[in-house]
Amino acid sequence: MYIDTVGQAVAELLLHRIREHDREFIADLRQIIERIARKWNWTDADSVNDIAQDCFIKLLESLSSGRFEGRSSFKTYVYTITRRTCIDYYKAARAVETTAIEDVGLADPAYSQEEQVIATERRKTAYRVLMSLPKDCRRLWRAVFFGKRNYRQAAEKLGLSEGSVKRKMWECRQLAREKVEFYEK
């Protein structure tokens, strides 16, 4: 009982510091998360930023719901959340097999050299657009297109309603169209 009370008090204090935008606390917290992510061999800045953002969201949700009981230090708690997030990122990265764009050949050798160059540029643009989309869009596209699922199946896999999947797919398509226009300029 005492541990639960202490845990709740600590969680409330930490939530207050985050919600009040305590820059020093948030910067220290971010450094801890980034250091842990780098120990898990995430070196590219985009991945580290994505992991840090996910960790902040998970920490806020966890602290708000009272899951942090104070039985361990807050740093240990942050480490656990960051470690699990890194593992999730590894699983997601492994779920999609990738091939270098240069290694992808055209099926029909009857294409002219110009058509092959245009097709290669389109693949590169598609890759750039996909990689520039927010993580939620990439996750959704992986579930629907790369997972060859319909909206209902994707919704079940992602734990969302079918209507949410349809709406989010529409939003992601709109964003992708804007990015295609940007990259083709």
Image (spheres, helix red, strand yellow):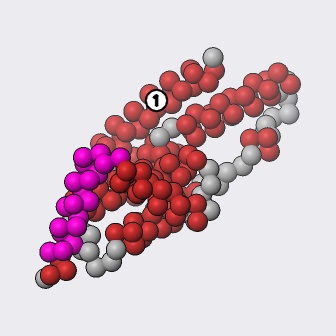
Left or right of 55: which side holds 60?
Answer: left
Residue 61 at x, y percent in the picture: 27, 58
Seen at 79% across and 40% down, the residue is 102
Seen at 42% across and 70% down, the residue is 80
Q: Is residue 72 above or below residue 94?
A: below
Residue 178 at x, y percent in the picture: 50, 24
State the extent of the magenta-drawn residues as a range.
Answer: 5-23
Q: Nearer the viewer, residue 130 or 48?
A: 48
Instruction: Determine whether the residue tagged by mark 1 lies in a helix, strand or loop.
Output: helix
Q: Nearer the viewer, residue 67 or 128?
A: 67
Seen at 33% across and 77% down, the residue is 72
Left or right of 75: which side holds 48?
Answer: right
Q: Is residue 146 visible?
A: no
Residue 119 sits in which quadrant? top right
Left or right of 170: which side holds 133?
Answer: right
Give the position of the C terminus as an image quadrant: top right
Check disc 1 and give the amino acid type.
Leu
Left or right of 131: which side holds 114?
Answer: right
Instruction: Check the image and name the residue furthest to the bottom.
Output: 1
Residue carrying label 1: 175
Residue 96 at x, y percent in the picture: 60, 54
Q: How many labels sit on residues?
A: 1
Q: Is residue 77 above or below residue 30?
A: below
Residue 55 at x, y percent in the picture: 40, 57
Q: Nearer the viewer, residue 97 or 7?
A: 7
**12 drawn magenta:** yes
Give the position of the N terminus as an image quadrant: bottom left
